Image (cartoon, helix red, strand yellow):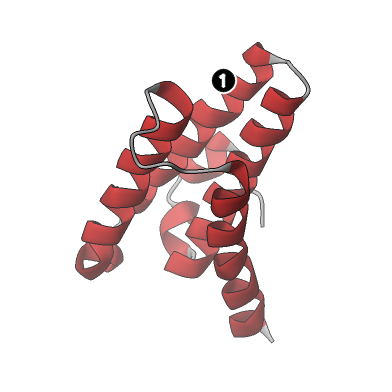
Amino acid sequence: MNLTHKDQASGKWFQLSLMEQLANVGSEVERTINWRNKNNAQYSRLAFERALELIDLTIADPKNINRLKEVLRVREVLADYFAFNNIYGSTDQSWIKYFLAFNYAARANKN
């Protein structure tokens, strides 16, 4: 379920499960990777900024209070990978694999 920024601001983001939220973050991360691989730095940066916005909304969601450690770490490592020196040694494939699990979980919970 892709939500517009208008939907996010109106609180619909908080109606999604954590799995759905992170699956949506993963979609933006994958867009970031795809645009970067196509040598389109501007679109890649915009997708990365959207991913960070979605993570920040996920962090702000009260129901995720018990999962903040993981979500905050994801934000830290994503920023390290896309904007800094990649000291954690992430790869495109490791991010795709990580977020794919949330996509599967979100779909499984809908069925």
The residue at the point 40 percent across, 32 percent down is 86
Badge 1: how crowded within 10 Å, few (<14), some, or many (20+)?
A: some
65 and 94: which one is in front? Answer: 94
User: Which amino acid, mark 1?
Assistant: Arg
Q: Is residue 97 left or right of residue 49?
A: right
Residue 66 x, y percent position in the rendering: 21, 69
Q: Is residue 62 visible?
A: no
- Give the vertical position of 94 relative to 19 (above or below): above
The residue at the point 73 percent across, 33 percent down is 34
Q: Is residue 29 visible?
A: yes
- Residue farthest toward the right in the current orientation of the protein: 38
**Circle 1 is placed at which residue position?**
45
Q: Is residue 94 left or right of residue 89?
A: right
Residue 74 x, y percent position in the rendering: 36, 49
Residue 60 x, y percent position in the rendering: 28, 49
Q: Secondary structure at mark 1?
A: helix
In the rendered image, which quarter contains the N terminus?
Answer: bottom right
- Give the vertical position of 76 relative to 84 (above or below): below
47 and 76: which one is in front? Answer: 76
Q: Quadrant of residue 78?
A: top left
- Give the vertical position of 50 relative to 39 (above or below): below
The residue at the point 47 percent across, 53 percent down is 13
Q: Quadrant of residue 68?
A: bottom left
- Give the vertical position of 62 relative to 3 (above or below): below
Q: Is residue 102 left or right of residue 13?
A: right
In the rendered image, which quarter contains the C terminus?
Answer: bottom right
- Residue farthest toward the bottom in the current orientation of the protein: 111
Q: Is residue 38 left or right of residue 73?
A: right
